[in-house]
Image (cartoon, helix red, strand yellow):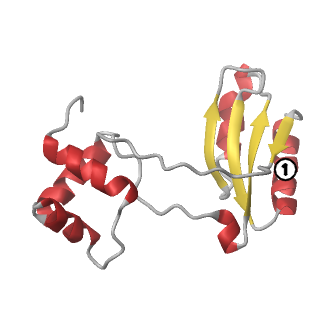
């Protein structure tokens, strides 16, 4: 989908950071925008199917629910990247996993109830893949920004 109309833009702007927590959130969005619930559902479905919307869901602050998080980086030979990423993605605490053009070429975030659990999971990843250059980079300060794209 290379284009979207003004209605789609309004919906995208509305749902990014101000998704209503109500029994019928799509209806609330529709009413706010002067649209029908059906029109909003159809638009969101089309935008999701086309890949413009990746996901709709909550963002939880790990520390507020008693969890810890960390950023990890690994030095993975090119021929092992797919297998390494596939294994890392099997861990339920991995929220992001992406490749970079750098010596440390695979980066991922890990969330778990404790740093000890993350460290144990990193050992499992290392033992299973044979990759020993894995960095655990927990944040010392967190600076959250609002990622809102004005469409």
Residue under numbered circle 1: 124
- The quadrant of the picture occupied by the N terminus is top left
- The quadrant of the picture occupied by the C terminus is top left
Residue shown at the point (10%, 60%) measured from the top left? 35
Q: Secondary structure at mark 1?
A: helix
Residue shown at the point (72%, 20%) measured from the top left? 102
- x, y percentage for residue 90? 66, 51
Q: Count residues near mark 1 (Cα–Cα under 10 Å), then give few for <14, some for 14-19, many for 20+.
A: some
Does residue 115 lie above or below 100 as drawn? Answer: below
- Toward which corner of the image does residue 64 lie, by quadrant? bottom right
Q: Nearer the viewer, residue 39 or 121?
A: 39
Residue shown at the point (80%, 28%) measured from the top left? 75
Query: Taking the image as drawn, is residue 130 in sight?
Result: no
- x, y percentage for residue 44? 25, 52
Q: From the viewer's perspective, is 76 left or right of 98? A: right
Q: From the viewer's perspective, is 19 left or right of 101? A: left
Q: From the viewer's perspective, is 18 left or right of 31? A: right
Q: Nearer the viewer, residue 50 or 136?
A: 136
- Toward which corner of the image does residue 4 lie, by quadrant? top left
- x, y percentage for residue 146? 49, 50
Query: Taking the image as drawn, is residue 86 in sight?
Result: yes
């Amino acid at each position: 989908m290379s284009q979207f109309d003004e209605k789609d833009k309004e919906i995208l702007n509305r749902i990014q950071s101000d998704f209503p927590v109500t029994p019928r959130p799509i209806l609330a969005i529709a009413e706010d925008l002067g649209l029908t619930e059906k029109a909003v559902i159809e638009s969101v479905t089309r935008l999701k199917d086309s890949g413009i919307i990746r996901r709709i869901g909550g963002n939880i602050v790990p520390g507020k629910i008693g969890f810890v998080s960390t950023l990890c980086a690994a030095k993975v030979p090119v021929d092992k990247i797919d297998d390494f990423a596939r294994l890392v993605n099997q861990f339920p605490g991995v929220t992001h996993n992406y490749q970079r053009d750098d010596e440390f070429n695979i980066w991922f975030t890990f969330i778990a109830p404790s740093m000890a659990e993350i460290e144990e999971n990193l050992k499992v990843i290392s033992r299973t893949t044979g990759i020993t250059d894995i960095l655990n980079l927990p944040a010392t300060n967190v600076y959250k920004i609002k990622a809102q794209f004005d469409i």
